[in-house]
Amino acid sequence: MSQRVNDEVVAKAMGEIRSGPSSGRHGDTLPHGYKVGVTPKQTLFREIKHSFLETFFPDKPFDKFKNQAGSRKFILGLQYLFPIFEWGRDYNLQKFRGDFVSGLTIASLCIPQDIAYAKLASLEPQYALYTSFVAPLVYAFMGSSRDIAIGPVAVVSLLLGTMLSNEISDYKSHEYLRLAFTATFFAGITQMALGVLRLGFLIDFLSHAAIVGFMAGAAITIALQQLKGLLGIQKFTRKTDIISVMRSVFESAHHGWNWQTIVIGLAFLVFILVTKYIAKKNKKLFWVAAISPMISVIVSTFFVYITRADKKGVAIVKHVKKGVNPSSASEIYFSGKYLGAGIRIGVVSGMVALTEAVAIGRTFAAMKDYSLDGNKEMVAMGAMNIVGSLASCYVATGSFSRSAVNYMAGCKTAVSNIVMSMVLLLTLLVITPLFKYTPNAVLASIIIAAVLGLVNIDAVILLWKIDKFDFVACMGAFFGVIFKSVEIGLLIAVAISFAKILLQVTRPRTAVLGKLPGTTIYRNIQQYPKATQINGILIVRVDSAIYFSNSNYIKERILRWLTDEEAQRTTTIEYLIVEMSPVTDIDTSGIHAFEELYQSLQKREVQLILANPGPVVMEKLHASNLTNLIGEDKIFLTVGDAVSIFGPKGEGVV
Amino acid sequence: MSQRVNDEVVAKAMGEIRSGPSSGRHGDTLPHGYKVGVTPKQTLFREIKHSFLETFFPDKPFDKFKNQAGSRKFILGLQYLFPIFEWGRDYNLQKFRGDFVSGLTIASLCIPQDIAYAKLASLEPQYALYTSFVAPLVYAFMGSSRDIAIGPVAVVSLLLGTMLSNEISDYKSHEYLRLAFTATFFAGITQMALGVLRLGFLIDFLSHAAIVGFMAGAAITIALQQLKGLLGIQKFTRKTDIISVMRSVFESAHHGWNWQTIVIGLAFLVFILVTKYIAKKNKKLFWVAAISPMISVIVSTFFVYITRADKKGVAIVKHVKKGVNPSSASEIYFSGKYLGAGIRIGVVSGMVALTEAVAIGRTFAAMKDYSLDGNKEMVAMGAMNIVGSLASCYVATGSFSRSAVNYMAGCKTAVSNIVMSMVLLLTLLVITPLFKYTPNAVLASIIIAAVLGLVNIDAVILLWKIDKFDFVACMGAFFGVIFKSVEIGLLIAVAISFAKILLQVTRPRTAVLGKLPGTTIYRNIQQYPKATQINGILIVRVDSAIYFSNSNYIKERILRWLTDEEAQRTTTIEYLIVEMSPVTDIDTSGIHAFEELYQSLQKREVQLILANPGPVVMEKLHASNLTNLIGEDKIFLTVGDAVSIFGPKGEGVV
């Protein structure tokens, strides 16, 4: 039984409401003669079309297709889907020089990271190398970011590994691998669907604060996992929470640690961190940090090969399969008991991968001032992962560390991704067997050094300074990840993000306004202590659109302001001015709340006056006949106008 | 990888941002000398306390406890929990006269409705009578509404019946009854928990529009169900969707209809509808409609008893158990396989019941101008249903039709509920066996007449006129209920309500402002066609708080306004003024969006200027150092001030 039902039936019965405009000092003229405007009513079709376009096509992707011939439209369409045909025409040798150098640089960073990240997903190293060969190639044709470096990344690898292991605990089984391809396929489908259906804005619902916390938690979880490789521990927990991991580490302290491994691991960890520090201090030396993982791999592999340290208990990679990607099209589960799990894991990892890629893409686009179509990007990412899943790849996305290196190495276009991809092809064809003696400890060092950058303490401090609620969201996601699991952390991040939205729309702010002496400007009396209230008038500003979720709160809050002010003032309040400037929209519940407010005020003998309702609000006030109830002469362009009519002559401040 | 991460690392590396305030025409004086105020910073504790109180205690229930002695506090607390101890002290004979008459009136309406509604829940009639005896009694002590009439209602009965039947299809089994008590118990627990945890605002998330549609759909579903009783059909579908029901009706048309039943049913349906029409035309005759169901029951029962029409196929009630409520405390499932179902059904029906009760309570409170504490009401409802579940009652709530009658009959306090409860007690003790020969057809007529009032076509037309999105929500819920089931309709209603909230926070409005000639007032140029733009300046107003869910959209929308305007104007745009009045809050994502906006504008050689940021926004701009980036001299009290400094001298309109 809705409020409306009762309102209508009973109140109409009583003849209590809709009694027409009540008397006011009608006929007084305003200082400047303007009244509140009403937008010419649009047709229903135009109205719906406009909100549909604004919701799903805010970037107006079709504008450029207008007034074009058929063949031209086809070419434009092709260029839209494959931006390489657009920017490729202006491509020149100078750009290629930048792309070539940056492509080589990110390839040298990518190869050791790939081998390490594959371990996070509990996959064999070659699958990450496959991913770094195919995915960037597809992206280079379809993507529109010029700076992003595509490939496997730490957090998505860990998330994928955790979720896959929950379904199939034996990660060496063929089913595990098949499920990984299935998840990758559906990650691609998810991403493409979000893009095609123009639902890209959904990823905006994962708030920045929650992501900061989630990333930091994932980074620490990943780093802790590396203690296995770094300390040479044989028996290690499969859980990822900090308590299980630390227990594993200390239980094996007496007999399970291998000092040779620790020496190698720590030595190269220090080396890589020092190069990172150098790069941070001197921007021109960024390449030192970029190639240090590769150098570490080469030196340590050579060292182990010479000394045969692997016979003394130093764990090595052992086997990386040579050759290019085999097809995996027949490996994907399209039916059977693992289909559901594959879809679920795919949706989650696809969304997380997107969040990461879009954030990176936007950041660099803003820095170079080119625009990025979020939905188009998602289609590219989706295509890349679908193709990847058919060619033995797992979920790829934009890598933070490699994209930054790419940018600093002077990449100009997505060609740097093609260069990287070609280097990976060469690696797969020729070099992979050489990684046999690469010690796991060095891979662990590379991962630790890479993920430390994800712990952004500055950002957390900023969250604390700017917005305490954001800080709580950040901490929630962080502790969820490190004390429970990446999935739980993600869930907490999403839940807190939504709670914030709900809170925002349920409890909007309201403020009492006062007049800045000597002006006709009315401002929040808490922000401007000099602002003074007017005798007999209370001015309240509502700072939000009025919808069903907050209409009742707003009505009651306004009445509470009135009660509070009446208790404080010596004179009676005759007029309540509601400043509507920030009220950009109102729905039927909001209209009813105003009707109820009007009724309550009538009982208290207070006149309701509205100042500056916007076009949408005015239209709805008219449509609902509320303007007649309140009285057209009670609606003003500004608070100043209303006060000039109803206020005491002379400045009657409280 | 969050935007922030990249921003910080890469951008700091490049030395591109945070380059300090850029030059402006600093030192010019404003017409009135006011600058944007910064609220004195509150301590963290005060800040958190304030938002906590505003979220959970917007009605300030503790204010009256302040500065009171211990014993006084105890009495106040008792009065808070049991408002009857507060208003009871002023109770007098005159009030009792009103309550007595209205109590008798609603009792006469309640008894036939109860017997009918019990059928909707597939329970025996006495359980509804039990409910109308115990629940109003508990509510009278704990509730604060003076007009609400408590008891079983049609929609909740139907919802409960549908959900219970999904679990246990044999509605005559003892398990079915036990599950009903279990659901009632957990409905009470849910309601009380919402009240105690101050989460009452959650029910505001079911939008008015969705409720209108849901109620209308439920009413039609209920009315269609009555065709069984009205037409005397023996074999009838258990499904509630319109297609199954109509098929049932027509398949039994040839042999399954009973003409005696139809005559009785239609005769009394016409009688009840005529009395309703009379009451609607002449408000003083409201009691005619109120007692017509009771008269119908008495006359038809007597008629059947005399003619023994039940032997000619007229279905009758047959058996109503005599005596007061037996205890059902031992019947509730606290473990076992039905516990989960009981909790689920309880939560859903408890929430729906609350929505109904709170809407009714608020409506009447607004009409008599007394205030109602929503959370307190929920505690009362919860207590009433918990007690009820222990005394063989099922879910009770406020009834729309009986509350309206209660109001019109002149009730003064909840004592009218006590009077009704006493009448029910007498009925249970003495009269119930007399209902044996009451024909089901008359009960069907009573239900149809009662639920027709829930179809509110005026409200639907109003929804269409005011807000098309609300109309869609309403229709979605409506068709969901009639073509599928009440549960699906409810689900659609909730989903659409949430979608609306998400849309609202993702795609806020923005507007380009122009100056009203001869004033310093800047308004939306679409609403005020006379408003003119200023040469070299673009003024954009953002109409929403800037949060992670919309920050990126707002940034890109502002840049699109700029691009569009640059294409239209002949002169270059040098200044972009963002009118921030409606921006009541900003979070870290919003701050980053402004940083990115600033960077993009720098690239385009456009200066970013802010007008009238509110207190919260100013505080966060300061905390994040964004004021230094943009420049303190770029932040103005009004758009007019900014234009007076940066605009062309003289009125350089476009």
Image: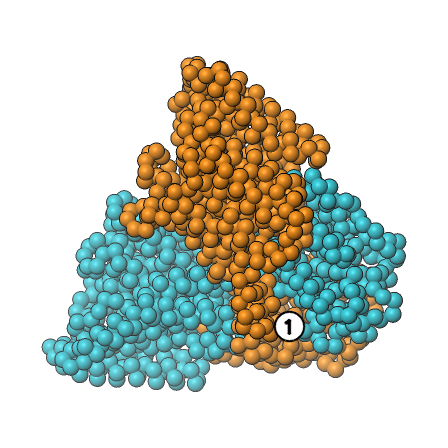
Chain colours: A orange, B cyan
Numbered circles on residues, count: 1
Of the pair B254 and A456, the residue shown nearer to us: A456
Kind of residue indicated by mark 1 = Pro
Of the pair B239 and A58, the residue shown nearer to us: A58
Q: Residue at x 68, y 29 (%)?
A: A278
Looking at the image, residue B472 sits to the left or right of residue A267; the answer is left
Q: Is residue B158 visible?
A: yes
Q: Residue at x 23, y 66 (%)?
A: B238
Q: Is residue B147 visible?
A: no
Name the residue tied to disc 1. Answer: A615
Q: Residue furthest left?
A: B311
Q: Residue at x 78, y 72 (%)?
A: B654
Q: Is residue B307 above or below residue A150?
A: below
The chain under label 1 reads: A
Horizontal and vertical percent position of residue A296: 56, 26
Q: Quadrant of the N terminus of chain B?
A: top right
Q: Is residue B24 above or below residue B101?
A: above
Q: Is residue B124 above or below residue B552?
A: below
Of the pair B192 and A436, the residue shown nearer to us: A436
Q: Residue at x 46, y 37 (%)?
A: A428
* Residue B284: quadrant of the picture: bottom left
Dot 1: element? helix
Of the pair B611 and B571, the residue shown nearer to us: B571
Horizontal and vertical percent position of residue A509: 63, 57
Looking at the image, residue B222 sits to the left or right of residue B538; the answer is left
Q: Is residue A281 above or below residue B362?
A: above
Horizontal and vertical percent position of residue A413: 61, 49
The residue carrying pointer 1 sits among few (fewer than 14), some (14 to 19) or many (20 or more) residues within 10 Å by Cα, namely many
Looking at the image, residue B277 sits to the left or right of residue A591; the answer is left
Horizontal and vertical percent position of residue B16: 73, 44
